[in-house]
Image (tube, grey):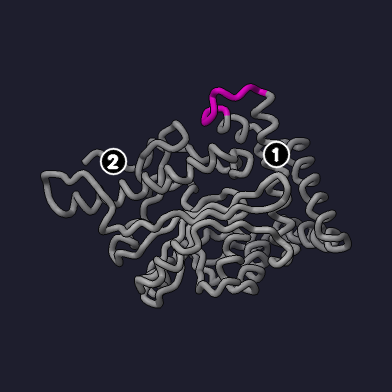
Amino acid sequence: MAKKKITSAHKLEYLLMTLTVKMLKLFPYNTAESLASWLFKSIGMGFGVRKKLALQQIGEAFPQMTGKEKKRTITKMYQHFGRLSADMFLVGKLEEKKINIVGWDNITQALQLGRGLLFISGHLGNWELAGRVLAARGIPISVVIKRIHNGLVNEHINRIREANGIKIIYKTKALRPTIQAFKNNEALVTLIDQNARKNGYRLPFLGKQASLHTGFVRLAIKNDTPIVFGAALRNEDGTYDFVFEKLVIPSEFPIKRGDENAADDTIRREIEIAKYFHGRLEHYIKQCPEQWFWLHNRWKRANKAKRTEL
């Protein structure tokens, strides 16, 4: 896909972003992080940046929440993404962060197989920090991303990622680089919680039918590449818990085999593995709903997705 045209609005948006970052750099990191948290909360709740959509979606996912609980959760979400943005653009020092890592041996075990590693997560917690930690620990890592609408912001963020040892693969041109990464026994990171629309399968997610991505599983099945789910969650005291779950080998994942043919079994395996990992993401969202990106219209046009009956 060609780069999107840079408009005057894009230039203004980028200017405001860079000026804000320069202003925040005048303060000690903890103060800057608090200011970014306040700024995101003020803009999000004050000006209603997708606030209505966020409240609607969290209400449908958590019908037991009261109005006050929903508002409090969304307020915390804006604050959380303010802190995350400060960490990304100000690049807080890793050695100053208190990170408790559980399951690192699952990553090393996966790479010992020599078939690469598919590392999956969602827009939950501080996924950008998780990528930096993986790269800093010597894991060769690429991330599959969707190009941001504002090309100037897109390139700025990618320069930060690349400076931290993270290679970029665009989703529209991901096939060949993904295969090569697996051949090189590298780790590939993909976030699975965006709306796949007509390209996905219709499956339940947080209590509603959604269009779920399964392409990442298809490639892992083809190469029998191990898959590890991870979550990088922030605690109230500013520390982090990084969880890397037990690896899944696609060929060993249990499925209910059909009576038709091997092709149906392959599709069934793809869908069942995708369901499993979306279920793991759902598990952590329920633990920390304020750390998930509720501003994305996750369930839009789920009826356009492919059905899963086999």
State the residue position of label 1. Answer: 76
Is residue 60 covered in magenta?
yes
Residue 139 percent coordinates (x, y): 51, 72
From the top left corner, tell me how far across and down residue 101 is, in percent. 57, 58
Dividing the picture into quadrants, the one containing residue 242 is: bottom right
Name the amino acid type tagged 1: Lys
In front here: 310 or 249?
Answer: 249
| Label 1 with label 2: CB-CB less than 8 Å | no
Magenta stretch encompasses residue 43: no
Q: Residue at x 59, y 74 (%)?
A: 165
> Could you tell me how far apart the alpha carbons at marks 1 and 2 are, in whole angstroms?
36 Å
Relative placement, left or right, of 283 versus 135 is: left
On-image quarter of the C terminus = top left
Label 1 vs 2, first from the N-terminus: 1
Foreground mark, 1 or 2, reads 1
- Per the rendering, the mark at residue 190 is none
Tell me the residue that label 2 is attached to. 308
Question: Which range of residues does the magenta coloring cover?
Answer: 59-67
Could you say where residue 7 lies in the image, as x and y percent from the top left? 68, 59
From the viewer's side, name the closer residue of 302 and 278. Answer: 278
In the rendered view, tell whether residue 308 sits above or below residue 270.
above
Given residues 265 and 173, the one toward you in this image is 265
Residue at the location (87% across, 60% down)? 27
Element type at marker 1? helix
Secondary structure of residue under mark 2 = loop
293 is higher (above) or lower (below) than 239: above
Dot 1 alpha-carbon crowd within 10 angstroms: few under 14, some 14 to 19, many 20 or more: some
